[in-house]
Image: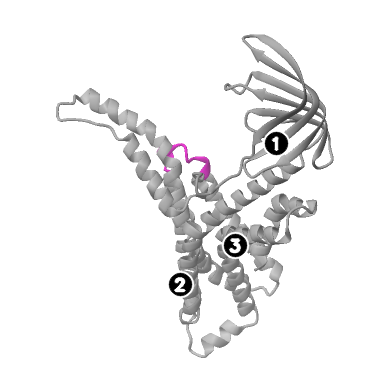
Amino acid sequence: MVFTFVLLLGNALKEVLPLLVSGQVPLTTIAKALGLLIPFVWVFALPMAMLTATLLIFGRFSADQELTAVRASGVSLLSLVTPILLLSIGLCVLSAAVNMELGPRCRVAYTTLLANLKGELFSTQIPAGRFIKDFPGYIIYVGKNDGTNLQKVIVFALGKDMTTVERTISAPRGRLEVGSTNINVYFYNGKIITMSDGRSFPGAFEEYVAPMPLVRTDPRQLKPKIDDMTFLQLLNELHDLESRFAWQTSRNSTAEQLRAARHQYEQRRKDLMPVIFQIHRQVAFSFACFGFTLVGIPLGIRVHRRETNIGIAIALLLVALYYSFILVGSALNNRPEMAPHLIVWLPNFLFQIVGGVLLWRANKG
């Protein structure tokens, strides 16, 4: 709960809190956004919490001489910690469900919800005094905006190349009307200049309406980013890329043709590696709880301290060491020759081997 709150607070302060302070977003919507963030932060909170709890418990257990009392009663350390190891394996299963399915789906839903909220707020409260380029095909400038009534309104309608201005509409006052699919900007007693073949054709009007598309994101229609894909989505993406990058050879192909085809395929594998890396990262993350528990039990006994801050400090150092391998692999995911998808497995093997050795030595006393 502590780690979830801390990680949730970091995301909320950056993205959700400004919407709450604005007072224009219902509290229920803010609560929904925070609820969607919880499974995403569990990806990191579960292993960190298991490691910290293990260090704190066994540090106190050793400092209070309870381990000595247990051994004097004829109970081995391995027998004592077996339920905790089984608990860590159960948390690995929970982590796998969060990392590979629940977390990515909630992250996509959260990002979509936040984007739609910002879009709606932006649509109803167009900032004054600057040029706005967030409406596809339009650039809008408003001198003053009190909600729906606008002053000194200028709209530039862009051409198909999105760089040239086809039409300029300006008026001393206007009005904003938000519909379900677009935003209608009403101009009153203004001027319009239409560009065609390098020539300008000015005109005037008493009332003019400029409809602008209101962009809303539908998670069912948009393809998520690789980092936000579930495990099954990543497998499908990998299959699609591999089928797209497959090459055709025959028995009559020369050695030079085979080498050229192989070289081309290796070059294209650079596009496959981010997907392969993400697949391995999700699976490797799922075993973090077990490795952290194996290290945390003997390390807590060796530290032999009651203080909570010592246990938390050691936990943070170990977490930083573990995730440094993930960061290195992520930085190399465009270099398949470095095998970044295997780097994410190194901390699991390192923690489990070191933890197993330390636990075996601690059990021997």
Report, in whole angstroms, how far the alpha carbon at label 1 lies from the one at label 3: 46 Å
Residue 334 in view, yes or no: yes
Report, in whole angstroms, how far the alpha carbon at label 1 lies from the one at label 2: 72 Å
Tell me which segment is drawn in magenta: 329-339
Crowding at label 3, few (<14), some or many (≥20) Cα neighbours within 10 Å?
many
Instruction: Work out which residue is located at the far bottom of the displayed protein and give it.
Output: 73
Mark count = 3
Badge number at residue 10:
none
Numbered disc in front, either 1 or 2: 1
For the residues labelled 1 and 2, say whether their Cβ atoms are less than 8 Å apart: no
Q: Residue 331: x percent and y percent?
A: 53, 41
Taking depth in this image into account, of 276 and 300 the one nearest to the observer is 276
Q: Residue 155: x percent and y percent?
A: 73, 26
Q: Residue 34: x percent and y percent?
A: 66, 59
Q: Secondary structure at mark 3?
A: helix
Identify the amino acid type marked 2: Trp
Identify the amino acid type marked 3: Ala
Q: Is residue 330 magenta?
A: yes
Q: Is residue 109 above or below residue 173?
A: below
Taking depth in this image into account, of 11 and 58 the one nearest to the observer is 11
Q: Which residue is mark 2?
A: 360
Q: Which residue is mark 1?
A: 184
Quarter containing the N terminus:
bottom right
Crowding at label 2, few (<14), some or many (≥20) Cα neighbours within 10 Å?
some
Residue 8 appears in which quarter of the rendering? bottom right
Look at 50% across and 69% down and name the residue there.
91
Crowding at label 1, few (<14), some or many (≥20) Cα neighbours within 10 Å?
some
